[in-house]
Amino acid sequence: MVDEAWSTWMDRPFAVDGPEAFNALALDLFRLHAARNPVYRAFLEGLRVVPDRVATVEAIPFLPIQTFRDHRVLLEGLAPALTFASSGTTATVTARHHVPWPALYERSFLTAFRRFLGDPRAWRIIGLLPAYMDRPDSSLVHMAHRLVALSGDPWGGLFRDRYDQVAELLRRSEAEGRKTLLLGVPFALLDLAEQHPMPLRHVHIVETGGMKGRRPELVREDLHARLRSAFGVARVGGEYGMTELMSQAWSDGAGRYHCPPWMAVRIREVNDPRSTQAHGRTGGIDIIDLCNVASCPFIGTQDLGRTHADGGFEVLGRFDHSDVRGCNLLFA
């Protein structure tokens, strides 16, 4: 049960219709977390930031994403109904995101999916997610399961590594002329491409995640070129998200992602995390996710990227010594 006060907070991100509304809600959430989030409050105190003096979104500090490994990042008085865990390949302790309102996560990813890809019922959805399928606490699997169910297509589903069966489903889609979404981690998509190359006219490929230690990391252009060649597609899409976020950005090709209205990416200078880089310059990716009402809406990631004037952004790699993890493309 969600009380009326929290219901208002949960509705507000989806009413954001421009920069003014975005900034107003971001500042309101900053004040909420400065007052009622013990971890974020301690972080601000360590920086000697006085919350009452923060008057602009640009002045809001971003909580380092590593904090989710060692601390319970959650507003006081809330208890998680669901906890997601990251899929680190080198860390013995993975990040955990405590979610008191699973319905908010579902509303976020469904609203964004509909914005960028349309109604799930228009698709046959096939998930090729071998690095995630054995983990019931994966946010990506949670999202993919729900999208498959909402599609209503009896042939859709999630698969670990049954490449022959996935290939047969893709052939069925081609024979039926059925619009199909193939959502997969890059190493599994490459395995499928090598074992079952075929022309795909009705399938939209979306990659998510990294190689998870299964293959050498590739630059995105090389990955996309191999998939385009094997499947005869003009473009390969992408999904950018992570355990610590309630929202995702989507790309329809060329590796440039776009956020839903309640999510924004800023680029910080590598050696000065309180300074912002201009469009086109490389730096650390900071994310404002206004749907992170309960945990922390202001996350400083370990990804490197750059923004563009059209509102899109690219992911270019990771900081040295950071773990290969999460539902994002991680290319060295």
Image (tube, grey):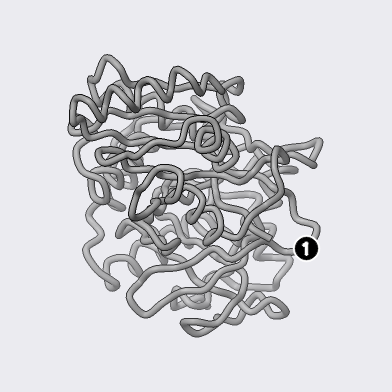
From the viewer's perspective, is 209 left or right of 214?
Answer: left
* Most foreground residue, 320 or 13: 320
220 and 24: which is toward the camera? 220
Q: Nearer the viewer, residue 264 or 312?
A: 312
Question: Quick check: 57 left or right of 45?
Answer: left
Task: Name the residue at 56% across, 58% down.
Answer: 222
Quadrant in the picture for the C terminus: bottom right
Would residue 18 be seen by someone viewing this image from the given angle? yes
Q: What residue is shown at x 59% (from left), y 75% (from top)?
A: 268
| Label 1 environment density (alpha carbons within 10 Å; few <14, some 14–19, many ≥20) | few
Answer yes or no: is residue 5 visible: no
Relative height, residue 58 to residue 304 (above, below):
below
Residue 31 x %, y %:
47, 61
Residue pushed farthest top?
154
Disc tally is 1
What amino acid type is highlighted by mark number 1?
A: Asp
Residue 43 placement (x, y as % from top left): 68, 60
Q: Position of residue 138 (x, y in %)?
A: 55, 30
Say which quarter of the image contains residue 263.
bottom left
Q: What element carries label 1?
A: loop
- Find residue 93 and report its horizontal and vertical position in percent: 77, 37
Q: In which quarter of the image is residue 235?
A: bottom left
- Looking at the rendered image, the quarter that the N terminus falls into is top left
- Judging by the rendered image, the residue that carries numbered circle 1 is 320
Which residue is depicted at the point 22% across and 25% down?
175
Residue at position x 67%, y 52% in the image: 217
**The one of 31 and 171 positioned closer to us in this rendering:** 171
Q: In which quarter of the image is residue 172?
A: top left
